[in-house]
Image (cartoon, rainbow, N blue to C red):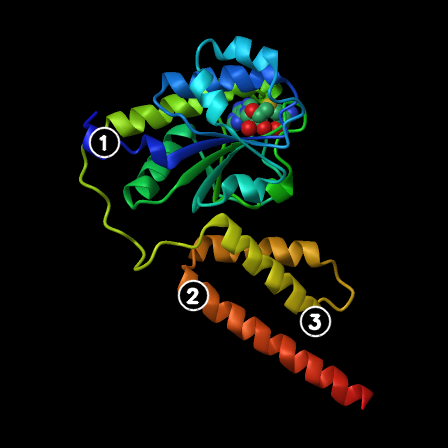
Amino acid sequence: MNPAVDLAPLFRFVLVRTSHPGNIGSAARAIRTMGFARMELVAPHRFPDREADALAAGADDVLAGAGVHAGLVEGLAGSTFALGLSARRRGINLPELSPREGAAQARAAALRGEQVALVFGNERTGLENDELARCHAMVRIPSVEDFSSLNLSQAVQVMAYELRMALLGGEAPPAPPEHDHPPADAAKMERFYEHLAQTLDDIDFHKGRSPETIMLRLRKLFQRAQPDERELRVLHGILADAQRMATLAGEGRRG
Ligand code: SAH
């Protein structure tokens, strides 16, 4: 690969709530063999751990550099495109991609200079709906129906391999940027969703209905739009005004 267009540093592998430290080690090895280096761990059950070191088999640099975070949003900070790996379709309506399609889209995002996250779930429970809701698409490795779940680190290996193939095959000219400004990162999007949820509450939008469904739907809408920071500032401004009007209306009723 031409080192001038080495996109690998733009990719991170995010392992969420991993139970077995051995899987963290094996995942580090899988990542390292395919030319990637960045791993982010969200609430790992045990880390650092001797088992992780043993199974990394020399990919110590990946383990040593791994960030450890309390929540997924922190693990995604700085990234603007996230793919959630899941063996099963969840209750959430996300586009479903094959690893190859996912790798192609991830490469296109990286060519636009975006940071990309590949998100993997817990060994037993996988990714929860609210974790998948923070991803732009879901990737399913097409395993057989009646035994669909791969070992975590093997799923990491499959995805890392497809990404490497996509990057190696990358002779096509860089995709033209789709955005005037880069999309806002996961942390800024999260702050916006919090503001939006709070505002809907303040203006009594829900009227007794559950806010969860509508918030998931709104997340999907804004994920698709990929607003940039300036656009988010306008939206925050609108929400702040709506909140101000709601407060005034409340005072009017009381007065
Ligand atoms: N019972 C869990 C399986 C978890 S396996 C579930 O149904 O989701 C641990 C992780 O490995 C998953 O969260 C996912 O990120 C990845 N994984 C395993 N099998 C996969 C598959 N067939 N396609 C995509 N990801 C898979």
Q: Judge whether residue 142 can be spotted in this image.
A: no
Most foreground residue, 55 or 49: 49
Q: Amino acid at mark 2?
A: Glu
Looking at this view, name the residue that lies furthest to the front.
64
Q: Is residue 135 left or right of residue 121?
A: left
Q: Quadrant of the C terminus?
A: bottom right
Residue 10 lies, in percent from the top left, at: 36, 36
The residue carrying mark 3 is 202
- Residue at the spot x=46%, y=41% of the render? 82
Classed neighbour count for the residue bearing mark 1: other residues with Cα under 10 Å, few (<14), some (14–19), many (≥20): some
* Mark closer to the chain start, 2 or 1: 1
Residue 224's spot in the image, x, y percent?
Answer: 45, 54
Circle 3 — which element?
A: helix
Position in image of residue 193 (x %, y %):
58, 58
Q: Is residue 100 above or below residue 146?
A: below
Q: Earlier in the sequence, mark 1 or mark 3?
A: 1
Q: Secondary structure at mark 2?
A: helix
Q: Nearer the viewer, mark 2 or mark 1?
A: 2
Ligand 1 shows up in the quarter that is: top right
- Of the numbered discs 3 and 2, the one sitting upstream in the chain is 3
Residue bearing mark 1:
170
**What residue is disc 2 on?**
231
Give the CA separation, mark 1 to mark 3. 49 Å
Mark 3 Cβ and ligand 1 under 8 Å apart: no
